Amino acid sequence: MASIPGHDRYSVFGLRAFIFQIPGVRSKEGGQCYRPHTRRGEEWPPVMMEVGYSEGVDSLRLDAEWWLVNSQGKTRFVIISKVERNPFALRFECWMMVESGHRQTRRAPAQIPQCVQDFDIDEAGVVVSTLGCTKLEIPYDCIFDGPGPDPPLPPVTFSLAELSHFAVWTFAMLQWYFPL
């Protein structure tokens, strides 16, 4: 964050265990969300993270879709993380609303939730992306409200080495707290 001009580590803050209610629709508690310091109160976060250990990746994908669709554009980026044990593995998927390719109607929305980045990390820390991603990128306008400056500011990025390091650290912590 500090590498983005005009921002520092205090430009974004994290919230945990925050429940969002939609009248007539189910409520949802997010795993971890991130908001710029310009948003106050109980507004939807622009970036949400859902972590699954016991739930399956398909359930996490439904969670990602829920955040993107029900927030009406206020949540713009969802990262799902599926943790596996025996052997250790970690899967990251990044979801955003993308153009559907169809004309908008009541049945066919103009935008749909879609996985735009994915990363599988094995026990040794080897990172592979089926989509050919070379880094995890969170676009500037997915984090901060309003249009960014012209030219656009760079995204927040995590290299494959950083993802690998994070996964290996996570595996070590799991072994420490939950030995086999």
Image (cartoon, rainbow, N blue to C red):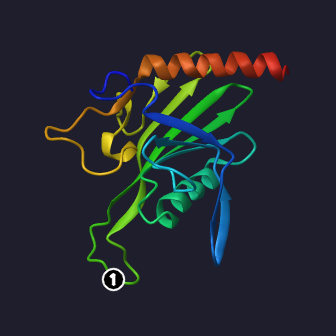
- Quadrant (top left, top right, bottom left, bottom right) of the N terminus: top left
What's the residue type where badge 1 is placed? Thr
| Visible residue check, residue 55 | yes
| Residue drawn at point x = 47 percent, y = 59 percent | 68
Residue nearest the viewer, comparing 157 with 119: 157
Q: Quadrant of residue 3?
A: top left
Q: Is residue 174 above or below residue 146?
A: above
Q: Position of residue 117 (x, y in %)?
A: 41, 41
| Residue drawn at point x = 41 percent, y = 82 percent | 107
Q: Quadrant of residue 140?
A: top left
| Visible residue check, residue 126 | no
Side of 54 relative to 23 (left or right): right
- Quadrant (top left, top right, bottom left, bottom right) of the C terminus: top right
Q: Is residue 94 above or below residue 73?
A: above
Mark 1 lies on residue:
105
| Residue drawn at point x = 57 percent, y = 56 percent | 42
| Total tally of numbered discs in the picture | 1
Q: Position of residue 114 (x, y in %)?
A: 42, 55
Q: Is residue 45 above or below residue 135?
A: below
Q: Position of residue 51 (x, y in %)?
A: 64, 41
Side of 19 relative to 141 (left or right): right
Side of 26 relative to 165 (left or right): right
Secondary structure under tag 1 reads loop
Q: Position of residue 121 (x, y in %)?
A: 54, 26
Residue nearest the viewer, comparing 42 with 127: 42
| Residue drawn at point x = 48 percent, y = 33 percent | 119
Q: Quadrant of residue 129?
A: top left
Residue nearest the viewer, comparing 86 with 114: 114
